[in-house]
Image (cartoon, helix red, strand yellow):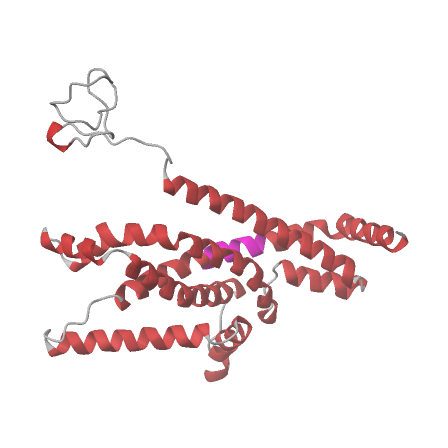
Amino acid sequence: MGKFSQLIQDVIRLCAKYLPMYLSGMKNTVLLALIGTVLGCIIGFICGVLNAIPYDTNAPLGRRVLIRTLRAVIRGYVEVFRGTPMVLQAVFIYYALPYFTDGAARFSSVWAASILVVSINTGAYMTESVRGGIISVDPGQVEGAMAIGLTHIQAMMYVILPQAVRNILPQIGNNYIINLKDTSVMFMISFTDFFAVHRGVVGATYSYFPSAVIEMIGYLTMTLISSFLLRKVEQRMEGSSSFELVVSDPLTLTSGVYRHPVSEELFKERSRDYKGKD
């Protein structure tokens, strides 16, 4: 109990002195994760849709070459950014520009570099998620959309993507929560996130474990709140679990599903010649 009491005292002492710094770091972490996830989703949707363009062997040569080139570029982008750690991506992106230009060009803001790193990293994962969401939609719906005269782009916008978004919504939330934690590597390019504040406090006080406890509680709080809000969004998109279909054409009524327009009673499954008791 003595060690535990001492730990609590050290945590309280650090919070009393450095709480504004911890809160500022948490704010930067949430903003970076949120902006990076939104931009990454946009990148992922664009790449996922382009990657889902059907390849027709009977199409003109130029179209076939363009589709194959797009798929090769997108595949290379996905494999590179999914196959390397974000910390190395941050180092390469932030330091490559001044390195190859002998210092003539560099990022003017560490925020811009950090957002770029998180966005393109998230976009690589979202590309495959979007492709999987598009594939999960019944192909018959695409054929039906084409049959009523919709183009491929129109079918993608009005039929496929609305369903794909619902299917990949959990993955979007998962990527956001991952980004909340993975932004901790941005200290490598001097971004002041929650983890960078922890490193600064440890350097000033040498209280590594008490500060780590504050970090653990802070990250857990951010992820739990985010998970709760994301579940609410998913439930909202699912709609009501109990509903009744309403139609005006009596020819489309299905027994046992719709209510009588006058008596508001459910239609029964029986023929008109039935003479028995209810």
Taking depth in this image into account, of 204 and 137 the one nearest to the observer is: 137
Residue at position x 32%, y 66% in the image: 47
Measured as percent of width and height from the top left, residue 177 is found at: 52, 56
Residue 25 falls left or right of residue 214? left
Measured as percent of width and height from the top left, residue 83 is found at: 46, 76
Quadrant (top left, top right, bottom left, bottom right) of the C terminus = top left
Measured as percent of width and height from the top left, residue 37 is found at: 45, 58
Residue 182 falls in image quadrant:
bottom right
Residue at position x 11%, y 31% in the image: 251
Measured as percent of width and height from the top left, residue 26 is found at: 61, 53
Q: Please identify the residue farthest to the right as the structure is shown.
A: 2
Residue 124, placed above or below residue 171: below
Report the span colored magenta.
27-36
Question: Does 31 lie within the magenta span?
Answer: yes
Dominant secondary structure (helix, strand or loop) of the stretch shown in magenta: helix
Residue 127, placed above or below residue 69: above
Q: Please identify the residue farthest to the front as the structure is shown.
A: 276
Question: Does 192 lie within the magenta span?
Answer: no
Taking depth in this image into account, of 94 and 120 the one nearest to the observer is: 120
Residue 269 falls in image quadrant:
top left
